[in-house]
Image: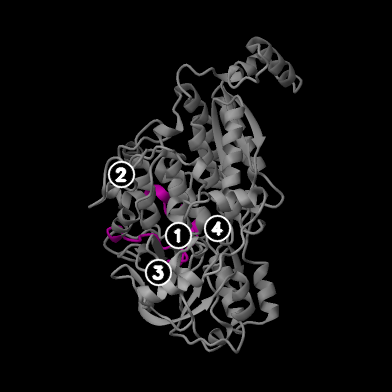
Amino acid sequence: MFDESTPTGMRSNLTSYGDTEFALFLRKAFIKGAGYSDDALDRPVIGIVDTESGFNPCHGNVPQLIDAIKRGVMLSGGFPVSFPTISVHESFAHPTSMFLRNLMSMDTEEMLRALPVDAVVLIGGCDKTVPAQLMGAASAGKPAIQLVTGSMLTGSHRGRTVGACTDCRFFWGKYRAEEIDDEEIAEVNGRLVGSVGTCSVAGTASTMAAVSEAMGIALPGSATPPAVTADRMRIAEETGRRAVGLATERLTIDKILTPAAFDNAFRVLLAMGGSTNALVHLAAIAGRCGYPLDLDAFDRMGRETPVLLDLKPSGDHYMEDFHRAGGVQRLMLEIRDQLELDALTVTGRTLGEELDDAPAPFPQDVIRPREDPIHSGGSIAVLRGNLAPAGSIIKQSAATAALLEHRGRAVVFEDAEDLAARIDSDDLDVEADDILVLRNIGPVGYPGMPEAGYIPIPRKLARAGVKDIVRISDGRMSGTAAGTIVLHASPEAAVGGPIALVRTGDMITLSVNDRTLRLEVSDDVLATRADEVVERPKPRRGYAKLYADEVTQAEEGCDFRFLQDPDPTTPVPGHVPGAVAGPVAGAN
């Protein structure tokens, strides 16, 4: 427990030798070998999590960020020390980055517990790194502040602004439909990523940056400066300065990550039309704090929260434009009356106080006023029914409106391998009105819940000009993707969920208006099918076995059960009409 009695500086977390003074003597002797003086070692120790990796271009500016953080720490009288942890990139992690998120969180937590740091700056950026760091820091309980690496610059292709990765999917779809040739897709490949940094649209990285600022765990104005700008370096310096303040004030992370903070995070997620993945990550972070996700309360919050940010894939702009328009603070000013303004932030002030001092709004066309939203019905809707009794979600703001109420014939793919083998076949029995169903890509089934929920349009339909089709899976989808896609069908197939029982030819009804997802098959038939399901083999050793044995379903954050707070209390979000407040029924 980190409190007023906890030793600080070099005296904290001493190695066990049976003699504490000898342990301190030995520690100082070794670190003095690096050239440090007693004056330096007597200052508050600020840890800096170094997630630089040659396999993580999203974190390509980390060395410069560390230099700026150290400058800020030293200007405020602290002693900065950087140390490495696992670094996970979305495109360089097999089988999927989600598989490694919990491992990174454990690495972060145990390093914070092991090292003599009075506060820590968490440098993250790529999709799973920020959630992993906040999960680990929440469990470790020390003062912490998040700094994101920032978004990449956009590129240009034949006069058109492009950026990863919504445009990646757009051009790849055109290539699959044979609308562009090999030469042009190769040209596009070199234009999509204009610099180091995270995706330049409302993908998971940008969404987690925005909700971190909304939760108050990152400094105001820190979410949107692009990676290679002076603004990003200045916010890094200020983050270092503030980390010293957190250490001296002993402002621990549990005082920031409160139910009110999570309510604000969910609200901003919805208002920006952010990634569906962020819902899973926020459930995991909240679960570490003892706050279980209430999916129905989240859906109610969505119904009253308009999408105001004109950012791809729900809109047309990029993160550079969002930053120039005023960033997250400007967005929050539009929904100020829906936020928990008394929530404490890492500045030591409340969110309301920070918004009082936010820069004055100015004319721009990226952040819409409440009376002129991008989408009025909530960006993410929660669906339930006999196909997903524990819930599923759809990003309706990025879907085709005409398909949000739809009845169609199921075309089933058993797993990712089956999908890859058949999706491009001219012999595939599929029509534009059908519903594609992909199973066994959930947390346990893959394992690791890949972003394969963005099922490609079958090639024969793409060539015919079909741009969207209803798709359902027990997996995830990139926040950069668009389409009428139902995700996170829970329970997943691998743990006996009803999605395992769908057969090609079954009729499925989707109604976003009624929030239902129903398989039109009788309970008796489903019971018979359940008896016929053959259990798929699971990993037998190593981290993969640990993952498959312990991972929870999407609505619980896909965290490991043994890492969650064992005594859950207040569900989140809580401050919405009809939400349940108080202890969780049956909590131990």
From this view, report whether residue 37 is shown above or below residue 571. above
Q: Nearer the viewer, residue 70 or 556?
A: 556
Residue 585's disc number: 2
Position of the C terminus by quadrant: top left
Q: Nearer the viewer, residue 386 or 106?
A: 386
Q: Secondary structure at mark 2?
A: loop
State yes or no: discs 1 and 4 in contact (Cβ < 8 Å).
no
**Which of the two discs, 1 and 3, labels the residue nearer the N terminus?**
1
Residue at image location 27% in from the left, 40% down from the top: 582
Residue at image location 30% in from the left, 46% down from the top: 574
From this view, report whether residue 513 is shown above or below residue 424. above
The amino acid marked with disc number 1 is Thr
Residue at mark 1: 276
Magenta region: which residues?
A: 303-330
Q: Residue furthest right?
A: 33
Query: Is 108 left or right of 322, judged from the image as shown?
Result: right
Instruction: Give the class, few, some or many, for how many residues have Cα within 10 Å of label 4's Cα (few <14, many ≥20).
Output: many
| Magenta run includes residue 584 | no
**Which of the two discs, 1 and 2, labels the residue nearer the N terminus?**
1
Q: Nearer the viewer, mark 1 or mark 3?
A: 3
Residue 444's disc number: 4
Q: How far, Cα to Cα, is label 1 from label 2? A: 27 Å
Q: How far, Cα to Cα, is label 2 from label 4? A: 26 Å
**Which of the two discs, 1 and 4, labels the residue nearer the N terminus?**
1
Q: How far, Cα to Cα, is label 3 from label 2? A: 25 Å
**Which of the two discs, 2 and 4, labels the residue nearer the N terminus?**
4
Q: Secondary structure at mark 3?
A: loop
Instruction: Give the class, few, some or many, for how many residues have Cα within 10 Å of label 2's Cα (few <14, many ≥20).
Output: few
Percent across and percent down for residue 161 are: 55, 68
Instruction: Give the class, few, some or many, for how many residues have Cα within 10 Å of label 1's Cα (few <14, many ≥20).
Output: many
Q: Nearer the viewer, mark 1 or mark 4?
A: 4
Residue at mark 3: 387
